[in-house]
Each structure stands twice: as C-alpha cells, then as structure tokens.
Image (cartoon, rainbow, N blue to C red):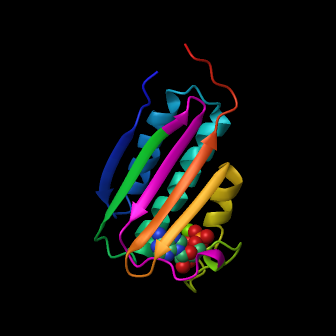
C-alpha cells in the first residue's frame, strides 16, 4: 500500500492552532483511531504548535510553521512540527515537567510532558537562532486494513 505523506505550512498565528488540530484530525481519522487516540494526537499537536507560536516566534505572529504527517507503518503515525524561530538552547531542561521559559502564570510548563504522555515517542531537535523540530510518533492500537 502506498504511504500517505502530507505537509502543510501556515503562519504562526493563534487561530492556526485550531487549523493544525483539524488537519491532523482529518489525517488520523483515516486510520480509524479510537476517540481517545484521536484526542491524544490532537492535544499533542496543539501543544507543539502553540509552543512554536508562543516560544519559537515569541507571539509576534511572524514566521512559518511546517506540519508534516506520515505513516511509518499502517498503525504508526509520525507528525513533525517545524518552526524557524529562536530555537532551544537546553532541550533536556526545556522538556522537564514544570519547566517554562516564561515567568507568566499562564505557562504551565507541562506541554512537553503532555506530548510525552500522549505519544509513544517525542523527539525534539533545536538550534538556537535556527528553530525547533518536534517529532511525534503515535502507535494506534486498533488498525484494520480495509
Ligand atoms: N518551538 C519552541 N521554540 C522555542 N522554545 C520552545 C519551543 N517549544 C518549547 N520551548 C521552550 O520549552 C519550554 C517548555 O515548553 P512546555 O513544556 O510546552 O511548557 P510551556 O509552554 O508552558 O512553557 C518553553 O517554556 C520554552 O522555553
Ligand atoms: Mg507549551
């Protein structure tokens, strides 16, 4: 079966968080996921995209976000979110629960923790001044090849 690879690129604007959720939802829905799996995928993608908008591009609303979706195996999805913003100097520290680079109370510092608990694998590659690439991998429990 031919593997389905899709990419979409959008502006780092807050309303595009909803767009990203809808797109990944439509992509994953073809795999017949459970409601729970779909919610987990959408939530993890939301966290990664909001991080790109808020942290990567510092809420300036300028910059592009690339979202790629790919099936590694029929029941294994890869979603990659790339921004070309400020990057992260210490990825390990940034991924620690409760760590947040911003002092504001609205920041929970739980974004990466949420991604890690909902996905099977989370890979973060970042270079200061060049951007951040977040790769999310999700294995679906039930997959029926129709
Ligand atoms: N795309 C990104 N670009 C730059 N920095 C990021 C990015 N994603 C995450 N970070 C850094 O990692 C920290 C932790 O992210 P997260 O766990 O989502 O918590 P929060 O977003 O609530 O701060 C952020 O505060 C920020 O410093
Ligand atoms: Mg976050």
Q: Is residue 57 depicted above or below 9 in this figure?
A: below
Task: Give the residue drawn at x 55%, y 65%.
Answer: 124
The outermost residue toward the top is: 146
Q: Is residue 61 depicted above or below 119 in this figure?
A: below
Q: Quadrant of residue 138?
A: top right
x%, y% of residue 61? 31, 70
Q: Is residue 62 depicted above or below 74 in this figure?
A: below
Residue range (magenta): 71-92
Q: Is residue 138 left or right of residue 131?
A: right
x%, y% of residue 65? 35, 60
x%, y% of residue 107? 59, 75
Task: Give the residue drawn at x 46%, y 40%.
Answer: 70
- In depth, the one of 30 and 16 nearer the eye is 30
Q: Quadrant of residue 87?
A: bottom left
Locate ligand 2 by image quadrant.
Answer: bottom right
The outermost residue toward the bottom is: 103
- In depth, the one of 32 and 138 nearer the eye is 138
86 drawn magenta: yes
x%, y% of residue 88? 50, 78
Task: Give the residue drawn at x 52%, y 53%.
Answer: 45
Q: Is residue 3 depicted above or below 145 in this figure?
A: below
């Amino acid at each position: 079966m031919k593997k389905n690879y899709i990419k979409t690129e959008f502006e780092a604007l807050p309303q595009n968080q909803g767009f990203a959720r809808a797109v990944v939802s439509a992509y994953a829905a073809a795999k017949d996921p459970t409601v729970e799996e779909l919610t987990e995928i959408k939530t993890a993608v939301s966290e990664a995209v909001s991080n790109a908008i808020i942290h990567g591009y510092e809420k300036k609303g300028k910059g592009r976000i690339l979202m790629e979706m790919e099936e590694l195996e029929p029941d294994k999805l890869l979603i990659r979110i790339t921004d070309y913003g400020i990057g992260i100097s210490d990825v390990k520290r940034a991924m620690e629960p409760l760590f947040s680079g911003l002092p504001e109370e609205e920041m929970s510092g739980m974004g990466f923790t949420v991604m890690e608990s909902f996905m099977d694998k989370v890979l973060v590659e970042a270079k200061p001044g060049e951007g951040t690439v977040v790769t999310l991998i999700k294995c679906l429990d039930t997959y029926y090849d129709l």
